[in-house]
Image (spheres, rainbow, N blue to C red):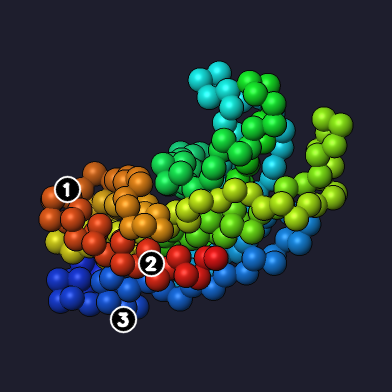
Amino acid sequence: MMIQNNFITKLASSNKRIDGRLFDQVRKIVVDDKIIEKAEGAALVKLGNTQVIAGVKLEVGEPFPDKPNDGVLMTSAEFSPISSPDFEQGPPRENSIELARIVDRGIRECGAIDTKKLCIEDGKKVWMVCIDINILDNFGNLIDASAMASAVALNQCVFPKYEDGKVIATEKTKKKLPVLYTAVACTFAKIGNHMLLDPNLEEEEASSCRLTLSTRDDGNLCAIQKGGTGHLSSADVEHALDVAVERGKEIRKLLK
């Protein structure tokens, strides 16, 4: 592992990557929004060899006391052992909790969903948007793949039938979820003195830290999250933001 990390770091110092990409280049993105026909919203995203499925389920519940007329967003992630030898069975671990929080924060801070339109009865009943992320194959950058899959699932989500105070999950309406913006996450790995967009698994292991920036359709930054113990300079962050805005525009076209 140490030999591989040193090799990747040496490559980066020569402005090269292990898979031949440019530092600001994303792996091939493939989107399938017909993966689960019976779901309110679902999508499979392939980012290189990384594969993630996100499903959206709409339920009716009580609003939070401080937002009595707003719908609720909840995001969870499951790391199946079949997706990577590093994942184990059992309750959610730190990495899956962190992933869910980063994706959730990007969607929430982006104002992606018009939560006011999810109110059914003021202070009593609202629609709850539940995003479930499942990792199928981990070949690096689960955050961006999960954010993409979640965005597509939200964009094509429709309401189930709601009648006499009950949700009829087997019957779908034509009413779509009120999505205002599409949040796109762009994650960078710092290797040596360089910021590499969309790191693969080998690059993640060789990096000193990670930076994820989530932007929305108008190019505004909505959320930023650092991971790892390495140092980031202000120039690193400014460069990453410029790249995230530009690449976000390109990625977003594939998600609608």
- Structural distance between the alpha carbons of marks 1 and 3: 25 Å
Q: Residue at x 43, y 68 (%)?
A: 251
Disc 3 or 2, which lies upstream in sequence? 3
Q: Residue at x 59, y 53 (%)?
A: 154
**Which amino acid, mark 3?**
Gly
x and y, in percent, of residue 238 in the image: 18, 56
Please tell me the numbered disc located at residue 231.
1
Q: Is residue 178 visible?
A: yes
Disc 1 or 2, which lies upstream in sequence? 1
Q: Is residue 151 left or right of residue 7?
A: right
**Which amino acid, mark 2?**
Lys
Mark 1 neighbour density, 10 Å: few (under 14) some (14–19) many (20 or more): few
x and y, in percent, of residue 207 in the image: 27, 58
Labels 1 & 2 near each other (Cβ < 8 A):
no
Please tell me the numbered disc located at residue 20.
3
Residue named by callout 2: 249
